Image (cartoon, grey):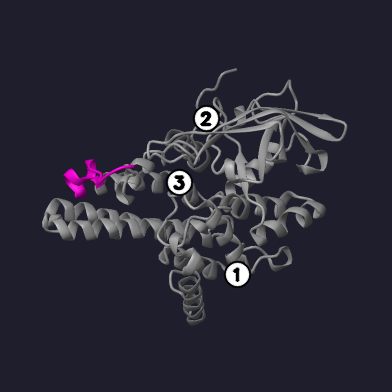
Amino acid sequence: MHIRFSEEDEAFRKEVAAWLDDALTGEFAVLRGSGAQDQTAHVEERRAWERKLASGGWTCVGWPREHGGRGLSLSEEVVFHEEYARAGAPGRLNHMGETLLGPTLIAFGTEAQRKRFLPPIVAGDEIWCQGFSEPNAGSDVANVQTRARLEGGQWIIDGQKVWTSWAAFSDWCFVLCRTDPDSKLHKGLTYLLVPMDQPGVEVRPIQQITGDAEFFEVFYNEARTDEDHRIAQPGDGWKVTMGTLAFERGVSTLGQQMLFRNELQAIIEVARSNGKASDPIYRQRIAEAWTGLEIQRYNALRTLSSKDATIEPAGMITKIYWSTWHRKLGELAMDVLGDESELLEAGPYQPTALQTLFLFARSDTLYGGTNQVQRNQIAERALGLPREPRPA
């Protein structure tokens, strides 16, 4: 594990920081400091920001050069994501396309599919969303019931997806469907790329406790996509999906941790201003939060340095660790704010950044696999304990 950066890495850090500092001005100044949770504000500016990043060669930085990426080393990727968060740059509108779908196509797609779909992701021209979760298949992805049948060279899709981030702003969705009507669980599933702008797709916003509507329900009613938009063979959808989810645990987690660091620093500043930094109890809690964040960083670096980070036991604790830590950070923020945590200045009564942290972080231990599901995976896959009983 390498936890120090070379002189070349530090020179690259200065390059990234300088470019971001210059770019987050003018029309993009409104995006600085918007963070990862303010996802539905300034959508058009964020679309333009994706293209701005592309113009500087700052999209898909870890992809191989032959697929349009920058081919950065692991340490350079870490530097980029850390500086991106440190600069207060906005949450990426095309996170799903760049971090999940692109690597999936590189690993499982055909050459024709890579030529069709990768360049628009690199250029920031096509935005993607993920169609996995359903009302009765959230953490239990293998229980999907959305159906697809092949007719006349097209897949016809019927069903419902839920908690689909950025669906209203996306051009395409990668959708897990059941194509064998007699199959159960992970068998008989197929991975399809589906255009969002068509009569058979209806998108409805889901109002969140923060007042935002980042998540959406997506209804498919005879929606269509071409047969050559299928990734891998019919019935191989589970294998491809597991590949996609493995990419979700990638180097961008270091950037996420820098956002957490920014939030912790904001809490520390409040504690200093209202005197709670002198209270030994709050000092202890802040110190514990800082220590937990350092543990996240070292564990992420250790996992990413592994030859197979997706199956290392150290990597399997990542999600449950950061989500639980972040939820507690939101609680710390409210306690440090005290009475101010329950107050808003005036209409339209949008929560402040720290109030939003608390409210949004309640979902961290649910999405991407609940803590209960994560514990099962750790028990069975990392510790080798017997599988829990399942229905026949």
Question: SS of the residue at dot 2?
Answer: loop
- Report the mark closest to the observer, 2 or 1: 1
Q: Position of residue 285 (x, y in %)?
A: 22, 51
Cα distance, mark 2 to mark 3?
Answer: 20 Å
Q: Which quarter of the rendered picture does the C terminus lie within?
A: top right
Q: Amino acid at mark 1?
A: Leu
Question: SS of the residue at dot 1?
Answer: loop
User: In the image, is 18 to the left or to the right of 295?
Assistant: right
The reply to whether dot 2 and dot 1 touch (C-beta < 8 Å) is no
Q: Amino acid at mark 3?
A: Lys
* Residue 282 seen anywhere in this rendered image of the structure: yes
Residue corresponding to mark 1: 72
Q: Mark 2 Cα within 10 Å, few/some/many (few <14, many 20+)?
A: few
Determine the residue positioned at 52% across, 69% down. 75
Q: Mark 3 Cα within 10 Å, few/some/many (few <14, many 20+)?
A: many
Residue corresponding to mark 2: 387
Cα distance, mark 2 to mark 1?
Answer: 40 Å
Determine the residue positioned at 30% across, 42% down. 347
Sequence-wise, the earlier of marks 3 and 1 is 1
Q: Amino acid at mark 2?
A: Arg
User: In the image, is 113 to the left or to the right of 79?
Assistant: right
User: What label sits on residue 319 in the rendered view?
Assistant: 3
Determine the residue positioned at 41% across, 42% down. 364
Q: Which residues are magenta?
A: 334-348
Camera-nearest residue between 34 and 138: 34
